[in-house]
């Protein structure tokens, strides 16, 4: 494997700059920092969604389930069982894997059936969270979820600390995604895209691989959900399982190009910031409609993302001259 | 206790009529175009809100909204077709995200136009009690169950006897062969979307006449329609009616015996059970498994 290509000096410098420059520039401004953190949260979900869509070939409308289960698992473990927050966050990801295990029978279904079944599952987990009051606090929600702690002398509870943590989570996931894509499994998954049957004939266990991708994706989304719970310190079923956690990441991933790794992340930052800073001021209620419009326009014009669209337009211009 | 259960079964049966209309629309479009329209529930909801407007602004009976609903909803459905038809590559996956996006647009349009409040009919004529033997129901429930059965019979006649209905079935079973027989698949798909819109319009007015509606209800309706098509298996109209009634009865029994909050879980329970035991549905023969 070619490490030099992935981790070339420019990337390392850029990453270091993001770690240091952003807190130095905006660290004092709570509003800007909260926008950045929220867009990284969206970016994390978008990345996990794109991994399942790109490598697994599965469109999921149920990522709200993983997000919510991860959030609740981590909140409940850290509050009722005094599990340290960072460990609880990882266990939140494990909780999302358990939710994904419950979805495995759905892998028998293909294409649109899978997508709808997983949408149905998301409804179920929301109902469970509102009805299982002894653990989740029901519709009233959970307040005072512990903040991120002080670790190795660094205080992670403030805005800057939160930023460093979510940035690290997203970067680690991006690297993991890159490693999976390059591994033999990644090759098998890409082959599966072209022909399910042919891949099976050469001895690849399709269903097992798809199930693995579902679990990897669930884990990522669950950890991001858990982070978010400790970041905003409050959870309720309608928030944790909101359709918004499906819509924005899908729009972000499609907008940035879901077949790439950086696409969903860039898409998340752009889509979220435009939505919050511009659209929300023009359309206070129903500003999500614009997300739907962007999604429709992207699928019709260029389902492979904005970059592909620009490249296509560029080529047309070249041909014209 | 037995009376309560029988009453719940009766209510569920009546509810099943509108569920069947919604599910048939979803199945019809899927059959013709291999596209699951994730905005289908929102089309139904749009019709319900048109009925609300006709009642609250004009003071008419909600049933009077049906002609207007049919025109608007089938036109919207045709518009969905025109957008979906523009997808060039990888239609199966892209159409899902596309119709999901259309669903988001419609939900938010409904939210902006009619606000987030819960709406229900004020019509006393619709809510009057009708007694059939030992069973009670609202007039609207019996009325729209009858309408649904008539529409389903009409749909069955249309699919099996009329030229366009046969064309829809021909395109469903083999697109290329249908083309060779002189059928224009594009026009057939458009027709299937319009018919699905008409069914959705009736179902929406029915839902408003005996239930409550909120802007977020559309997604739930799509999931219910999907569960019914899984129960029924593809390509069987009586199967869809029975699946819809099963779902209606399961929900109404859950409300009577447990709690109304668990209503949606009962449908999911049925869905998982069928998925494990009979992956091809109760009546379908076609293949869904990978």
Image (cartoon, coloured by chain):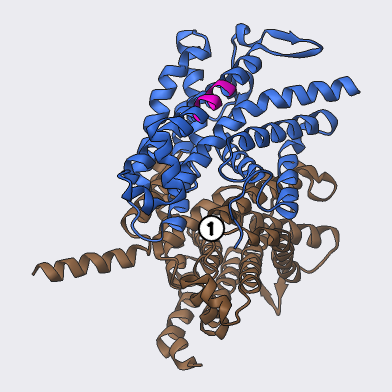
Chain colours: A brown, B blue
Q: Is residue A185 left or right of residue A5?
A: right
Above-or-below relation of A259 to B63: below
The quarter in which the C terminus of chain B is drawn is bottom right
Q: Residue furthest right?
A: B1
Q: Quadrant of residue A260?
A: bottom left
Q: Relative to A219, say whether B18 is above or below.
A: above
Q: Which residue sits at x=69%, y=67%?
A: A93
Judge by depth and name the residue closer to the eye, A87 or B30.
Answer: B30
> Which residue is at 33% across, 60% downward?
A302
Q: Residues within 10 Å of mark 1 (few under 14, many from 20)?
A: some
Name the residue: 49% across, 57% down: A250
SS at mark 1 in the image: helix
Closer-to-camera residue (A239/A303): A303
Residue A32 % position (x, y): 47, 59
Q: Is residue B56 above or below residue B115?
A: above
Which residues fall within the magenta stretch? B149-155
Most common SS among magenta residues: helix
Is residue A176 visible in the rendered structure shown here? no
Please state the horizontal and vertical placement of residue A183, each as a whole percent of the image: 55, 85
Location of mark 1 (residue): A111
The answer for which chain carries disc 1 is: A
Question: Residue B262 lies in magenta, yes or no?
Answer: no
Q: Is residue B141 left or right of residue B154?
A: right
């Amino acid at each position: 494997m070619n490490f030099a290509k992935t981790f070339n000096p420019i990337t390392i410098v850029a990453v270091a700059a993001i770690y240091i420059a952003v807190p130095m520039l905006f660290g004092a401004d709570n509003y800007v920092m909260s926008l950045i953190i929220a867009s990284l949260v969206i970016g994390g979900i978008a990345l996990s969604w794109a991994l399942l869509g790109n490598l697994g070939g599965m469109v999921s409308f149920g990522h709200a389930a993983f997000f919510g289960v991860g959030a609740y698992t981590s909140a409940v473990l850290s509050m009722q069982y005094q599990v340290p927050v960072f460990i609880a966050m990882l266990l939140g990801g494990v909780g999302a894997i358990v939710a994904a295990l419950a979805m495995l029978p759905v892998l028998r279904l293909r294409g649109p059936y899978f997508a709808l079944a997983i949408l149905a599952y998301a409804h179920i987990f929301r109902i469970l969270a509102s009805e299982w009051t002894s653990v989740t606090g029901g519709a009233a929600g959970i307040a005072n979820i512990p903040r991120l702690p002080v670790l190795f002398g660094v205080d992670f509870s403030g805005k800057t600390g939160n930023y460093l943590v979510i940035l690290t989570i997203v970067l680690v996931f991006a690297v993991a995604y890159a490693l999976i894509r390059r591994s033999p499994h990644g090759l098998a998954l890409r082959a599966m895209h072209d022909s399910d049957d042919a891949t099976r004939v050469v001895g690849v266990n399709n269903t097992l691989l798809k199930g693995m991708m579902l679990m990897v994706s669930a884990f990522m989304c669950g950890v991001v959900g858990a982070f978010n719970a400790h970041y905003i310190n409050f959870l309720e079923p309608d928030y944790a399982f909101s359709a918004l956690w499906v819509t924005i990441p899908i729009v972000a991933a499609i907008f940035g190009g879901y077949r790439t790794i950086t696409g969903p992340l860039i898409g998340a930052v752009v889509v979220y910031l435009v939505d919050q800073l511009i659209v929300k001021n023009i359309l206070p209620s129903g500003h999500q409609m614009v997300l739907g419009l962007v999604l429709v326009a992207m699928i019709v014009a260029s389902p492979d993302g904005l970059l592909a669209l620009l490249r296509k337009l560029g080529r047309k211009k070249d041909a014209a001259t | 206790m037995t009376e309560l259960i029988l009453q719940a079964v009766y209510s569920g049966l009546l509810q099943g009529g509108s569920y069947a209309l919604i599910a048939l629309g979803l199945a019809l479009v899927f059959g013709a175009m291999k596209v699951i329209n994730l905005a289908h529930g929102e089309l139904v909801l749009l019709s319900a809100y048109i009925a609300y407007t006709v009642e609250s602004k004009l003071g008419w009976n909600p049933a009077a909204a049906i002609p207007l609903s049919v025109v608007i909803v089938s036109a919207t459905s045709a518009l969905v077709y025109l957008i979906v038809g523009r997808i060039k590559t990888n239609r199966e996956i892209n159409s899902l995200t596309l119709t999901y996006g259309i669903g988001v647009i419609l939900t938010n349009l409904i939210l902006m136009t009619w606000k987030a409040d819960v709406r229900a009919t004020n019509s006393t004529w619709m809510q009057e009690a009708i007694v059939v033997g030992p069973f009670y129901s609202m007039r609207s429930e019996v009325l729209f169950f009858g309408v649904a059965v008539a529409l389903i019979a009409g749909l069955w006649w249309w699919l099996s006897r009329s030229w366009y209905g046969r064309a829809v079935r021909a395109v469903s079973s083999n697109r290329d062969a249908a083309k060779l027989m002189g059928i224009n698949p594009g026009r057939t798909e458009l027709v299937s979307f319009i018919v699905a819109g008409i069914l959705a319009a009736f179902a929406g007015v029915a839902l408003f006449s005996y239930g409550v509606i909120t802007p977020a209800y559309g997604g739930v309706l799509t999931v219910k329609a999907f569960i019914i098509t899984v129960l029924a298996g593809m390509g069987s109209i009586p199967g869809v009616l029975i699946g819809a009634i099963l779902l209606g009865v399961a929900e109404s029994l859950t409300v009577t015996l447990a709690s109304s909050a668990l209503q949606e879980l009962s449908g999911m329970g049925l869905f998982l059970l069928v998925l494990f035991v009979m992956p091809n549905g109760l009546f379908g023969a076609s293949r869904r498994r990978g």
